[in-house]
Each structure stands twice: as C-alpha cells, then as structure tokens.
Image (cartoon, grey):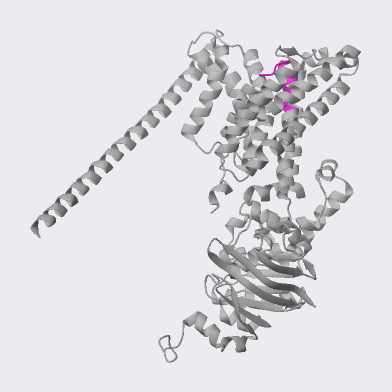
C-alpha cells in the first residue's frame, strides 16, 4: 500500500519552475532516495510535501488522503516529519527540550492542567520526557547523559544532525523525510548514520524518503532511487539501474563528446 | 594616448587621497565619540560615587537621612520594583516571541486596575471590603487579571496579528497608537478624574516586624509576596510545561515550531494572555501601593517597566524581574542618596530623572542589559 502518492506536482517561484509535474509513490517500509544536481528541486519537493509551500498544481496523498493545502502543523499531526539541509534546531533550548517540543502534536495538556498541576498534566509531562529520552537513545549514548541538558547550539555539527532526526522521530511520524542527513559529516560518522537510517526502517518501522548527495549512502540503504533534474523526474529504479542510466549521467556530467551537441 | 593616461593617473591619485582623508576623518570621529562616551562613564561614576559618599557621611553624622528612613526607602524600592518587574515581564515576553516592543502594555495594566476599582468600590459600599478584605482582594485580583488578559488578547488579535509579517517598526508604531486609543477609551468610558481605591484595613497599613528587626508595612509585604508567587508560577509555566516549551520554541523559530505541530497563532495569543495576566496582577499591586488611578496611570509605569525590561536584558524573564527591582531601588534609594548627597533640594520630585538616567547609563555601560542574552532573532537568516 502506498504511504505517499504524488501526481503531477508543480510549483514555480517566479519564472523558475522548481517542480514541473512530478509523480512519485512510496510504499510502506520503503527507503527511497531522491537525488539530482543542485537546483534540481529536491528541497522544494520536501517543502511542498510538508505544507511549507502550497503547490501550484498536483495531488499529494498521504495514506490515501489528500494533504494539499493543510498547514504544516496539521501535516505533522497526520504523520509526516522532516529534517533540514541546513540544520534548524531551537538553538537556545536544551537537547532534551528540543525533542520534547517534537512531542507537541501528540500531547494535549494546556494552561489549566499546568496551573492546577492536575494528575493528567503531571503524567503527560513525565510521558513526554520518557519518550524524548527513548528517542535520544536511538543514537546510543551520543545525545544522552550530560548532553541532554546542554543547549542545542553547544552541540557538534554531527550531533546537531542527529538531534534533528531525533526531534523528527519524536513527532511519531510514519513517513520521515530526511534532507541530506550526512551532509558535512566525516566518513566515519557517515557510515554510522547510514546504518542508523537502515534501522529507522527496520527497528522503528518508518517509511523514509531521503535527499542525499553521497552516492555510497544512497547505494547502501535505498530500495529505490528517484532522480530529479530541473523539476522533473528523469529516472527511477534501483541504484544500479539509475547509476548507469544515460539521462542521469548526462544530468550530472553533461553529454559525452562522441554523441555531442553539433550534428 | 598620453592624455587619457594622465587623466587616469590623476583619477587614481585623487581617489587615493580621498580614501585617506575619509578614513582619517572616520578615525578622528570614532575617537571623539569614544572619548565622549568615556567622559560620560567617568563623570557618571564620579557624580554617583560622590553623592553616595556624602549621603553616607551625612547619615553617620546624624544630619541627613536616618537609618529608619533608609530602611523605608529600600523596602519601598523593592515593593515598587516588584510591581515594575511584573509589568516588565509582559514587555519582555512579547519582545521575545514577536521581536517588537508592545507600548500598549501600560494601558493593559491600567485597564485592569481601572475596572477592578469599580468592583472594589462596590465591595466597599457593601461593607465586604471591611469585613472580609482577603475575599475582596481575591475578587479584585481576578477581575483585574481577567480584564487585562482580555484587553491584551483583543489587541493582539485586532492590531498585531494582521501585521505579523510586516517590518517590526510597524507594530511598534501601531502599539503607540493603541496605547493612546486605550487611554482615551477609558477616559471616555469612566471619566478623566482620578479614582481612589478604598483604604486597606488597618492591619495591612501597620508595620509588621519581619524577622524581628525589620519593620515593613503590611501592604508592601503583600505586594512582594504576590509578585514572588506570580514570578515563580510564570517561571514554572515557561520552563516546565508543554505550553511554555511551545512558547520558547515559537520565540526561536516560528516556521520550525509550526512544523513540530505547534499552533503558532495560539501560542502567540497565550503569550499575550500570560503577559496581560501579569499586568493585571501588577495593576492590583499598584492599587495596594498608591491607591489612586486614572486613565493616564498606565503611561509612566509602562515606560518604566519597559526601562526595567531593558535594564534586565530584554527577552529575559528573570532579567525583567531583577531589572524591575533594581529600577525600584534606583528610584527610591538612588534619588535620595545621590541627589540628596549632592545637596540638590527637593530630590524626591526628581524620581523620574533618576529612573531614566539609569536607563541611559545601563545602555552606555552594558547595552545588552544586566542579564542580556543572545537573541535568537539575530541568528536567523
């Protein structure tokens, strides 16, 4: 059953056609990589799915229901979460608080519970905290212990990326959109995170759509690879098929000289 | 060929000489401004230091302010400062979340105090004020909190929400307009005369010996206790609850907060509501301390609370409270100590000079305020 079904998705910014009629379906439990040269429309694709921009045309169905025109918070509530290419945490909140904020859409206690410290309020606060710790443990001891109480701005770059994934996990999504999760990481950290992306699906049961530039990461974890260029899908298939696809090679490297432009 | 070359050379030299003279002028100007700032700093320290020194000497000689009067001034300063602090919280919270100064906050405070005056009057007429003051206080507190909260929320909805994406100067100007609008609405509704709250019962007006040696008026103890409880409550709310976390998340990054499932509009409304509630409490504290209220009452305390928020470091809640108390002390103790010590007659009437000089001095010495913190707005792309 497709978790995400996209048909004819179109979005233009002024004269630039960021997305020009993209079709995509993602099945439950799949890891799909979206690749393409810079400016291909990958991040715009994520922005439109998560409701940060409204598409000009096209249909986005999440678990069979249209999510076009919904606010970002509603889409998060439905079960879609994302991370950002340029990490966007709450820098002055602690590590634990960042993840606890992620639980916001799954909890309900308001001012009155807090004011009168009702049993439900106290239970919920405890539940939020326990859940946040559980999500942080996904990354082993890297974000646990004393780091929990550090402000996010004090973290290393790799840890910020991990924390952003943890915060997305805390929203209890069924579909996780990762925007260049390994960007800026060293080779060792990249290998570690590649393994974690696999276990996001295997252990936690998320369906993952990932934008990635590191082809080793893409090759290792993807069930399917989708290639975008100039807002259109130019290839789709498993990694080996896509890697040898002429259109893809052309998009990345330009045309070979022998069947070159001048005829 | 030769002619253009010559011209070019001339151009180059003139450009060079121009930049040189410009940078020299710049250096000279910067040096002059720096020097002037240092002069102000040193002059301020000397004047304040001399004033304090003289008034201490005078007290020790038994001429000037007596020890009792000192105690009185300090206690009044703290009590009044606690009230400023409560009001400063509203400025600081709105600044933290929306990044502009809500100058109408003083009127939110006045509105609460004004409406609860009529309730207090009714309670007094019925004799409840005399027979059960605690109940009356509770009732006027609730009325003031509800009124102020309501005004703050309506102002946000009507005046600020449509300007959410406008440059920050625009809601700032709007808030000044709202401030006048509210002042004259209240003047029109309730008249321009000064209204006086009924006097609190004797046991509150008498001095109580705190810890056995510090005699403090009952009302001032009440003011300090109410302010302390409210502050602790607010701290708990902002730091330890789901709604408070949402507020801090919205303050840092609205877009991402929305993506985390936080309803940004509702969070901003609750920020105004909490700030308004604090202003309502401050309105009652004002009534306990000064008893008189008019449509213009919100203006000066509002500006002073803003000063307190800047003193403490705007955007920082603990800073707002501390800034309030520091300002209260400046106003009460500083006036007598510094101006009295300098031998200026009628120092008491120069209170406001002191409080606003304090603002200028803090900005000269420490522009970020006492507790100034990194503001997330500055980090944003």
Nearer the observer, B135 or B44: B135
In the depicted structure, whether residue A126 falls above or below residue B219: below
- Chief SS of the magenta region: helix
Tell whether B103 sits left or right of A137: left
Nearer the observer, B308 or B322: B308
Residue B108, image x, y percentages: 70, 28
Residue A90, image x, y percentages: 63, 54
Rendered-image quadrant of the C terminus of chain A:
bottom left
In the depicted structure, whether residue B241 falls above or below residue B218: below
- Picture quadrant of residue A209: bottom right
Measuring 50% from the left and 80% from the top, which residue is drawn there? A252
Tell whether B164 sits left or right of B146: left
Residue B312 seen in this snapshot: no
Outermost residue on the bottom side: it is A258
Outermost residue on the left side: it is B2
Residue B121, image x, y percentages: 83, 15
- Picture quadrant of residue B319: top right
Tell whether A260 sits left or right of B359: left
Measuring 74% from the left and 46% from the top, which residue is drawn there? B266
Which span of residues is magenta-colored? B281-296
Residue B50, image x, y percentages: 46, 19
Is residue B43 within the magenta segment? Answer: no
Is residue B286 within the magenta segment? Answer: yes
């Amino acid at each position: 059953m497709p978790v995400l079904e996209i048909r004819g998705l179109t979005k233009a910014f002024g004269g630039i056609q960021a997305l020009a009629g993209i079709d995509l379906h993602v099945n439950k439990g799949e890891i799909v990589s979206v690749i393409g040269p810079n400016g291909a429309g990958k991040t715009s694709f994520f922005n439109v799915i998560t409701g940060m921009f409204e598409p000009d045309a096209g249909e986005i169905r999440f678990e069979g229901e249209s999510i076009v025109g919904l606010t970002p918070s509603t889409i998060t509530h439905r079960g879609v979460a994302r991370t950002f290419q340029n990490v966007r945490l709450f820098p002055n909140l602690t590590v634990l608080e960042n993840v606890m904020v992620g639980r916001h859409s799954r909890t309900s206690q308001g001012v009155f519970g807090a004011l009168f410290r009702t049993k439900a309020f106290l239970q919920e606060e405890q539940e939020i905290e326990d859940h946040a710790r559980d999500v942080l443990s996904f990354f082993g001891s890297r974000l646990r212990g004393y780091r929990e109480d550090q402000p996010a701005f004090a973290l290393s770059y790799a840890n910020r990326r991990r924390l952003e994934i943890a915060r997305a996990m805390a929203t209890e999504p069924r579909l996780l959109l990762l925007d260049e999760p390994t960007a800026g990481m060293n080779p060792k950290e990249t290998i570690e995170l590649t393994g974690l992306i696999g276990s996001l699906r295997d252990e936690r049961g998320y369906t993952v759509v990932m934008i990635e530039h590191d082809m080793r990461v893409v090759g290792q974890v993807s069930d399917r690879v989708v290639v975008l260029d100039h807002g259109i899908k130019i290839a789709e298939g498993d990694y080996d098929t896509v890697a040898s696809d002429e259109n893809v090679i052309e998009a990345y490297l330009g045309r070979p000289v022998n069947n070159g432009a001048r005829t | 060929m030769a002619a253009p070359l010559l011209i070019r050379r001339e151009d180059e030299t003139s450009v060079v000489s121009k930049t040189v003279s410009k940078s020299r002028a710049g250096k000279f100007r910067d040096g002059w401004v720096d020097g002037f700032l240092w002069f102000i700093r040193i002059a301020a320290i000397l004047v304040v230091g001399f004033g304090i020194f003289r008034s201490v000497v005078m007290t020790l000689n038994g001429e000037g302010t007596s020890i009792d009067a000192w105690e009185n001034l300090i206690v009044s300063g703290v009590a009044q400062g606690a009230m400023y602090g409560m009001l400063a919280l509203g400025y600081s919270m709105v600044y933290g979340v929306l990044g502009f100064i809500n100058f109408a906050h003083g009127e939110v405070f006045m509105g609460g105090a004004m409406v609860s005056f009529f309730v207090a009057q009714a309670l007094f007429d019925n004799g409840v004020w005399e027979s059960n003051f605690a109940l009356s206080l509770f009732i006027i507190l609730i009325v003031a909190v509800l009124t102020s909260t309501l005004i703050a929320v309506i102002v946000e909805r009507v005046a600020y929400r449509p300007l959410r994406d406008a440059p920050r100067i625009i809601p700032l100007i709007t808030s000044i307009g709202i401030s006048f609008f509210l002042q004259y609405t209240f003047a029109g509704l309730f008249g321009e005369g000064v209204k006086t709250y009924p006097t609190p019962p004797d046991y509150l007006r008498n001095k109580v010996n705190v810890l056995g040696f510090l005699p403090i008026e009952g009302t001032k103890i009440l003011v300090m206790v109410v302010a302390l409880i409210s502050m602790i409550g607010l701290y708990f709310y902002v730091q330890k609850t789901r709604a408070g976390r949402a507020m801090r998340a919205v303050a840092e990054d609205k877009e991402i907060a929305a993506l985390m499932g936080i309803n940004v509009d509702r969070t901003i409304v609750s920020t105004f509501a909490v700030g308004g509630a604090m202003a309502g409490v401050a309105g009652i504290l004002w009534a306990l301390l000064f008893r008189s209220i008019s449509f213009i009452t919100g203006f000066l305390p509002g500006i002073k609370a803003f000063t307190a928020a800047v003193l403490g470091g705007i955007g920082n809640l603990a800073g707002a409270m501390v800034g309030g108390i520091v300002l209260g002390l400046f106003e009460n103790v500083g006036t007598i100590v510094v101006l009295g010590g300098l031998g200026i007659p009628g120092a008491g009437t120069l209170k406001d000079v002191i409080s606003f000089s304090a603002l200028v001095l803090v900005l000269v010495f420490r522009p970020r305020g006492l507790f100034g913190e990194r503001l997330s707005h500055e980090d944003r792309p």
